Amino acid sequence: MFQQGRVGYGQECNYMKSGTGDRTCKTFVKFAQPFKEIPKIHHSAGVIDGGGSSIKINIFVTDLTNEGFNINVLTWGDSHISELEVDWMAVGK
């Protein structure tokens, strides 16, 4: 089975647009149909709008189950993220 989607980070992660230091935003993705087993997840940044001396982003998955997962976006230093879209694919049984 294969499922895919896109998660947008904007207003709900407004605190990533300014400030310094580590800032993380987390979004839960619920699968349209649960998998029988925990699937493999692939993710990638689709759209990035940011600033600062350089744009620093770490995108990672946590809390993966057969029903869904969290996509986390971390930025640090003086990096500012105004908008980010993350595409994801889940593959499994």
Image: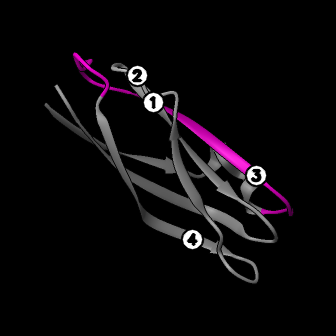
In this figure, which residue is indicated by the disc labeled 2? Answer: 65
C-alpha distance separating marks 3 and 4: 16 Å
Which mark lies nearer to you, 2 or 4?
2
Q: Amino acid at mark 2?
A: Thr
Q: Taking 75 as reference, is 42 left or right?
A: left
Mark toward the start of the polypeptide (3 vs 1) = 3
Mark number displayed over residue 49: 4
Give me the residue at 65% from left, 75% from top.
Answer: 55
C-alpha distance separating marks 1 and 4: 24 Å
Question: Does dot 2 land on a helix, a strand or a loop?
Answer: loop
Give the image location of residue 5, x and y in percent. 31, 43
In this figure, which residue is indicated by the disc labeled 1? Answer: 69
Give me the residue at 44% from left, 66% from top.
Answer: 47
Q: Amino acid at mark 1?
A: Phe
Residue at the far bottom in the pictured view: 53
In this figure, which residue is indicated by the disc labeled 3? Answer: 23
Nearer to me, 44 or 12: 44
Question: Does dot 4 land on a helix, a strand or a loop?
Answer: strand
Q: Residues within 10 Å of mark 4 (few under 14, many from 20)?
A: few
Q: Amino acid at mark 4?
A: Asp
Q: Amino acid at mark 3?
A: Arg
Give the main secondary structure, helix, strand or loop, of the magenta stretch: loop
Q: Residues within 10 Å of mark 2 (few under 14, many from 20)?
A: some
Give me the residue at 65% from left, 44% from top.
Answer: 25
Mark toward the start of the polypeptide (3 vs 2) = 3
Span highlighted in magenta in the image: 18-38
